[in-house]
Amino acid sequence: MIDEKTAPRLPRSRTRRTALAMVIGGVLVAFIAVWALPNMAGPAFVQVRAVVAARTAPVGPTVAIGGLAAVQATAIDLSVEIDNRYPLSVVVGSGRTAYQAAAYRRESNGHLTRVWQAGVNDPALEEGSDSPMGGLSNNTAAVVPTGVSRHVITAGSASFLLTDTTGAALAPGVYYLRVWAYGIGSPLVPVSLDNGVDPLGAPTDLPQPTN
């Protein structure tokens, strides 16, 4: 039987150092989780998706969005869905228009040519000296809440009217839509007009925002 008087004891100073190290480690973890990651790595937690809806009408081309059943329509409305998968709000920044959408035609050489674009700003966007992105006049930043939020990009006459930049009706074929939120882009959404097909298959090069 071990004599309690002679049993080795952990020095009190070592116990204090261990406790202090645990406290510092906890503070560091909390700092990274609550401030550093949401403010410095915000875009890594945000996913963007295009919400595309055909505006049906008794006239106009047949429109098949993302391989779904075709409908007759005169225009396409777009919204951007933002999914922040971090359990806290995160900061994202960009000098671009907050929400953008664009449509592209696939050329025979495989390149994408933009035939339409639209964009709206976020009224809650922070600017100037209050911006977390550095305080320069051309910098902007936004706080994205956790979870899923949706913002309308086109409505009414601002919708994609299935015409090119000259106002001429788009030729039958496959067109590709993409949206952005704070410079973060969505996957491409194929839209087939009048049963058009793309013999080259889905593009692998993703177009960038316009500004």
Image: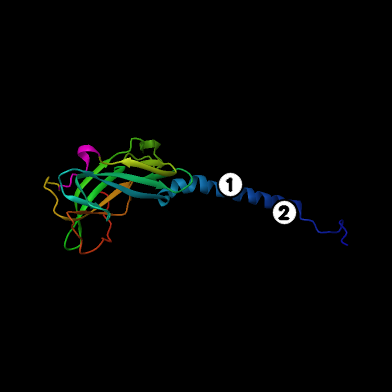
Residue at the disc numbered 2: 14
For residue 91, side relative to residue 96 (left or right): right
Q: Which residues are magenta?
A: 155-163
Earlier residue among tags 1 and 2: 2
Q: CA distance from mark 1 to mark 2?
A: 20 Å
The label number, if any, that marks residue 100 in the structure image: none
- Is residue 156 inside the magenta stretch? yes
10 Å crowding of disc 1: few (<14), some (14-19), many (20+):
few
- Is residue 102 inside the magenta stretch? no
For residue 121, side relative to residue 169 (left or right): right
Q: Element under label 1?
A: helix
Residue at the disc numbered 1: 27
User: Magenta residues: mostly which secondary structure?
Assistant: loop
Q: Residue at x 14, y 51 (%)?
A: 170
* Image location (x, y in percent) of residue 105: 19, 55
For the residue pair 96 and 170, the one nearer the viewer reads as 170
Q: Amino acid at mark 1?
A: Val
* Colour treatment of the image: rainbow
* Image location (x, y in percent) of residue 77: 25, 43
Q: Amino acid at mark 2?
A: Arg
* Mark 1 or 2, closer to the camera: 1
